[in-house]
Amino acid sequence: MGANKVTHLSNRHERRARRANSPAADVALAPTDLPPIERLTPDAPAANNLHGALLGQAVLLDWLGQAPISFHRAYVDIAGGVVPALWLSSAMARMVHAPRESFQGDTFVFAMSGHDCEQETGISRGQQETCRRQLIAAGLISEQSGQRKPIVYRLHLDAIARALIEQAEPLAQMFQQLQPQDGAMDSGFPALPTVRQIAK
């Protein structure tokens, strides 16, 4: 009885060894039967569409989160270029919500750092320096800088008004030539003032 049990156990171990060494076992454990990695990844077109949608939302949020810039074409000639005119337009827009103490006579006083200017207008630090030099040379602004403090600017509103009036003088003269001398009587409206009268 004991010999039969030993023989039975020996035969069981032999069968297990033959199964482990058989080609069928190698086939069952072969990695080629595993699903390819690309089947487990998201579809490429779907991933591109998702990225495009997220990028579009980011652009929209960035655009809506920035205040628009008011640009006045009339400032280009008196400021000496498009970029100085953009700087001047941004500075003039600050007057809308400025407190009363910001106005001193014919000047508007405000402080603005280079970082704030670049955030509001997109004008770089180097371009800001060029803008300020041109506007100072034209007599439209003056500045006072302090150590580690934002630059304090003064907009000379009287000089800006005079420059705009002088710029519009040829157009006003053309209007006066087109207007008949008795136009005030015929139209029922008073005659337009001359440019020199406005400047005074």
Image (cartoon, rainbow, N blue to C red):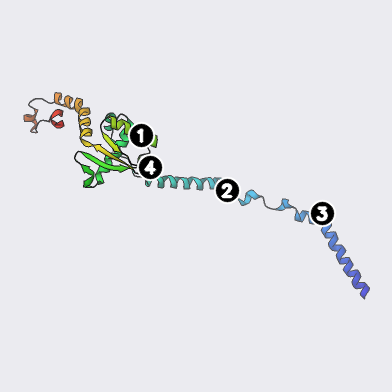
Identify residue for label 3: 23
**Residue 59 location, x and y as percent?**
43, 44
Sequence-earlier tag: 1 or 2: 2
What is the C-alpha distance between the residues marked 4 and 1? 13 Å
Residue for point 84% across, 57% down: 21
Out of 76 and 144, give the one closest to the viewer: 144
Q: Earlier in the sequence, mark 4 or mark 2?
A: 2
Instruction: Describe the element under mark 2 as helix, strand or loop.
Output: loop
The residue under label 1 is: 129
Residue neighbourhood size for the residue with mark 3, other residues' Cα within 10 Å, grouped as few (<14), some (14–19), many (≥20): few
Can the viewer see residue 83 in this picture? no
Helix, strand or loop at mark 1:
helix
The residue type indicated by label 2 comes to Asp
| Kind of residue at badge 1 | Glu
Mark 1 surroundings within 10 Å by alpha-carbon count, few (fewer than 14), some (14 through 19), many (20 or more): few
Residue under circle 4?
115
The residues tagged by marks 1 and 2 sit, at their Cα atoms, a distance apart of: 51 Å
C-alpha distance separating marks 3 and 1 = 81 Å
Closer to the camera in the image, 124 or 173: 124
Q: Residue at x 41, y 46 (%)?
A: 62
Q: Is residue 189 left or right of residue 115?
A: left
Label 3 or label 2, whichever comes before in sequence order: 3
Q: Secondary structure at mark 3?
A: helix
Marks 3 and 1: which is nearer the front?
1
What residue does disc 2 label?
43
Residues 169 and 110: in front is 110
The answer to whether one can see residue 168 in this image is yes
Mark 4, mark 2: which one is toward the viewer?
Answer: 4
Amino acid type of the residue that numbered disc 4 sits on in the rendered structure: His
